[in-house]
Image: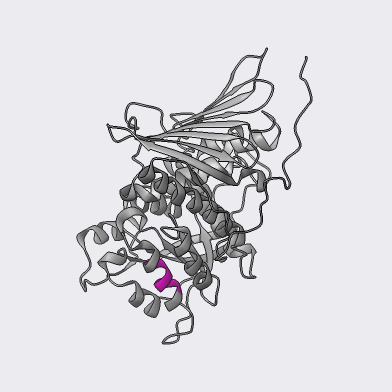
């Protein structure tokens, strides 16, 4: 087990309720959960106990980018410092990088900072080089969108994949309990080819909740991978009560319909996704923790983690624990620079769809979605007919 010294930038709810409990508790030392929830059950005895590859230690905390101008540690940061068991507190992120040797840097500003994209780029740019005998962190974990638009992502990608820390873009919502179980079913051909996705989210589709909207788009598009999952056109409209609806058309012919802000998460099992396949099969994910699998001529199957079990934590259900465990495993087991191309490509796909959606909300008409890589200034070649997954024509007559 290798020790990993971690510094955290941010004081939001995700830091207090998910990141610090994961790194300071038993989640970081538990085996990965790939979606088979029955593997999470504790056994009374075991011949070989799981050995976590990394032992995380939170050694430094500082406020978000907007708090860097203050030379005084905020009361909020002091509370988080006590929760992190005596981590050194810094009001300035650059001072933390200059004085504290770190193996990994976690940036969890979220929606707290309107200039998040530029702050991230500046932070990555300032990290290279040994200063005062302190080497920069080798790894950087980012919670939230790496940029606010597809154009800004290009500048960030050129900076982040230079000589700075190796980049890891978090995808906590995709790793939520129900969503990782749904992805496991799709990989095992549980519903065949995805033909349509219907989704509802408990937040508004606007600039104030851009981070949440980015996570929602990234989640929806992740269920149709490869060239077939590239979005081609979007039509969006905003209703009188502030809710927004959209229709996304993908290269494979599948469609995604989504409704934002029509209810809240306190009295509704949201977010809710219905993923439709072939032969009448579909999957329903509710609140990120409950999954229904429907197959014709068979009883519906329900998967849900136990509600009163100490070994199933809230960060595990929300996906933060699984994302951080995967990040720590890569930090230890992959000494070579991590290839962030796939994460940047996923970010470019989600940001391109978001840009076109906001344009459609303003114009009231359908908008084409530009297929462009994270570094490219020109559209890539049309890939609508490339590498579409084979159709499942097997009939289940049993």
- The percent coordinates of residue 160 (x first, y second) are 51, 70
Residue appearing at x 33%, y 40% in the figure:
204
Number of callouts in the render?
Answer: 0
Location of residue 194 with respect to 52 vertically, above or below = above
Q: Nearer the viewer, residue 160 or 35?
A: 160
Residue appearing at x 40%, y 47% in the figure:
358
**Residue 114 visible here:** yes
Location of residue 95 with respect to 139 vertically, above or below = below
User: In the image, 218: left or right of 361?
Assistant: right
- The percent coordinates of residue 120 (x first, y second) are 41, 67
- The percent coordinates of residue 30 (x first, y second) are 55, 47
Which residues make up the magenta segment? Answer: 119-124
- The percent coordinates of residue 26 (x first, y second) are 48, 48
Q: Pick the quarter of the image with the N terminus.
A: bottom right
Q: Pick the quarter of the image with the C terminus.
A: top right
Location of residue 125 with respect to 385 vertically, above or below = below
């Amino acid at each position: 087990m290798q020790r990993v010294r971690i510094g955290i930038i941010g004081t939001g709810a995700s830091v207090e309720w998910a990141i610090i409990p994961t790194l300071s508790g038993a989640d970081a030392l538990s085996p990965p959960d790939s979606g088979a929830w029955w593997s999470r059950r504790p056994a009374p005895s075991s011949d070989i106990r799981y050995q976590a590859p990394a032992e995380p230690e939170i050694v430094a905390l500082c406020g978000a980018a907007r708090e860097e101008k203050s030379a005084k540690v905020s009361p909020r940061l002091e509370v988080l410092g006590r929760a992190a068991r005596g981590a050194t507190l810094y009001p300035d992120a650059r001072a933390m990088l200059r004085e504290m040797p770190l193996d990994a840097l976690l940036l969890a500003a979220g929606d707290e900072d309107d200039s998040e994209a530029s702050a991230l780029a500046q932070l990555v740019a300032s990290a290279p080089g040994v200063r005062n005998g302190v080497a920069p962190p080798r790894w950087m974990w980012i919670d939230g969108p790496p940029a606010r638009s597809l154009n800004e992502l290009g500048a960030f990608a050129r900076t982040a994949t230079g000589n700075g820390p190796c980049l890891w873009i978090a995808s906590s919502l995709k790793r939520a309990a129900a969503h990782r179980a749904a992805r496991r079913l799709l990989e095992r051909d549980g519903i065949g080819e995805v033909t349509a996705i219907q989704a509802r989210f408990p937040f508004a589709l606007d600039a104030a909740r851009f981070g949440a909207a980015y996570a929602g788009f990234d989640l929806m598009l992740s269920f149709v991978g490869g060239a077939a999952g590239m979005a081609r056109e979007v039509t969006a409209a905003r209703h009188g009560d502030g809710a927004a609806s959209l229709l996304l058309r993908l290269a494979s012919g599948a469609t995604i319909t989504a409704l934002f802000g029509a209810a809240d998460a306190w009295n509704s099992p949201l977010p809710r996704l219905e993923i439709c396949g072939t032969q009448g099969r579909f999957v329903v994910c509710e609140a990120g923790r409950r999954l229904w699998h429907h197959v014709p001529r068979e009883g519906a199957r329900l998967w849900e983690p136990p509600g009163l079990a100490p070994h199933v934590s809230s960060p595990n259900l929300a996906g933060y624990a699984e994302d951080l465990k995967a990040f720590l495993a890569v930090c230890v087991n992959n000494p070579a620079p991590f290839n962030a191309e796939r994460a940047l490509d996923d970010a470019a796909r989600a940001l391109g769809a978001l840009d076109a959606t906001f344009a459609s909300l303003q114009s009231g008409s359908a908008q084409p979605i530009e297929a462009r890589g994270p570094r490219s200034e020109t559209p890539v070649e049309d890939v609508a007919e490339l590498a579409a997954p084979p159709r499942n024509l097997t009939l289940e007559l049993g």
